[in-house]
Amino acid sequence: MINGQEPRPMTGILWMLVTGLCFVAVTALVKWMGPGMPPSQAAFLRYVLGIVFLIPMLKDVRQANLTPRQWKLFTLRGLLHSVGVSLWFYAMTRIPIAELTAINYLAPVFVSIGAAIFLGERLAARRIFAVVVALVGTAIILRPGFREVANGHIAMLAAAAVFSGSYLLAKILSDEAKPTVVVFMMTVFVSLGLAPLAAIVWVTPTWEQIGILALVAVFAQAGHYTMTLAFAAAPVTVTQPITFLQLVWATLLGMLVFSEPVDIYVVLGGVLILASVTFITWREAQLKRRPITPTINATKV
């Protein structure tokens, strides 16, 4: 039973397919916009343009009686996510879409490690093996010593690590506040955190850039909503493997739209990382405890 209802696996799979397409659309739009706008400014405008989606959440926020400790955690999460989003926007315009998508799969693995270090989660032998598999997948993608590891790769690795910190804080806060409050506070604090970074490098945006970032906000919001519908319809162990298709869509998009060659090593590395994340998710379900590891989709923008 999920939320008192019988599981609907096919419905969950279909919603997760839509989720993957939405998040690939986000990636494609940022890639299409290119490096003409500083990453921190692009990220700031994306969040500001998305504030309109927060209006229905105002009632829950007004009713939330947040403690000083919770305010500090929300602030810290906003700062971490601000850095992560800026790094993601930077990486997106500098490395192929497939590589960024594959490296992004690492975020849940970093969360698993962070949960063991900071939240006292037990890191059993099987989970350690899964983490090692993910790191092997990363090495296959980057192939240090065999090709140049670009600044974009380093930025995306850093983004995945920073996002994992944001997700760990989200785990703590989601136990104490409604999901709508957590989402609202993240969007507001990320906007505030990015504002000074954007002001330092500000360039006057074109109407085309504003339009693209508005579409990014729409697809990102739609992706998070359809992901929620997927989780409401089917267990995460059913929907998690579907996230592999994001790498398929990203690879095809990079090849057909951006003339990026298909790199079999990136696909192989991405499969290993995703297999690691899927196994960790499955084990958590088997142990009948609340998942600490977020899905691959629960990320970035």
Image (cartoon, rainbow, N blue to C red):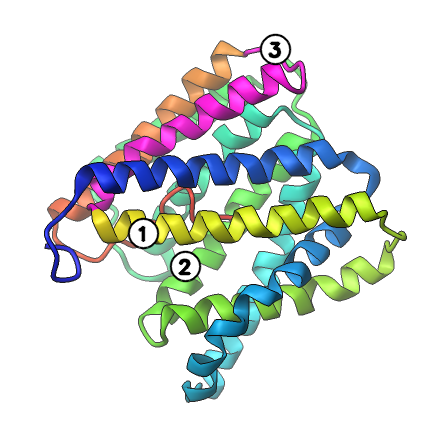
The x, y position of residue 5, in whole percent, is 12, 57
Q: Which residue is mark 1?
A: 229
The x, y position of residue 13, in whole percent, is 27, 36
Chain-order first, disc 1 or disc 3: 1
As drawn, is 13 to the left or to the right of 170? left
Considering only vertical position in the picture, is 2 above or below 93?
A: below
The residue under label 3 is which amino acid type? Pro
The residue under label 2 is which amino acid type? Leu
Q: Which residue is mark 3?
A: 261
Considering only vertical position in the picture, is 128 above or below 1?
A: above
Q: Nearer the viewer, mark 1 or mark 3?
A: 1
Mark 2 residue element: helix
Question: Which residue is at a point 29% across and 32% down the rendered structure image?
Answer: 241
Question: For mark 2, does the 10 Å Cα neighbourhood hold few (<14), some (14 to 19), or many (20 or more) residues?
Answer: many
Q: Is residue 235 magenta?
A: yes
Considering only vertical position in the picture, is 60 above or below 170?
A: below
On the rendered image, what quadrant is the N terminus found in? bottom left
Is residue 250 visible in the rendered structure shown here? yes
What is the CA distance from the residue labelled 1 to the residue labelled 3?
34 Å
Quick one: 35 or 129, which is closer to the camera?
Answer: 35
Q: Which residue is mark 2?
A: 168
Quick one: 143 or 271, which is closer to the camera?
Answer: 271
The x, y position of residue 185, in whole percent, is 52, 72
Which region shows up in magenta? Answer: 234-262
Whether pointer 1 and pointer 2 mark residues with C-beta atoms closer than 8 Å, the reply is: no
Question: Which residue is at a point 55% across and 17% down the rendered structure image?
Answer: 143
Q: How many marks?
A: 3
Is residue 127 visible in the rendered structure shown here? no
Question: For mark 3, does the 10 Å Cα neighbourhood hold few (<14), some (14 to 19), or many (20 or more) residues?
Answer: few
Question: Which residue is at a point 62% across and 30% down the rendered structure image?
Answer: 153
Chain-order first, disc 1 or disc 2: 2
Query: Which of the labelled discs sits on residue 186, or is there none?
Result: none
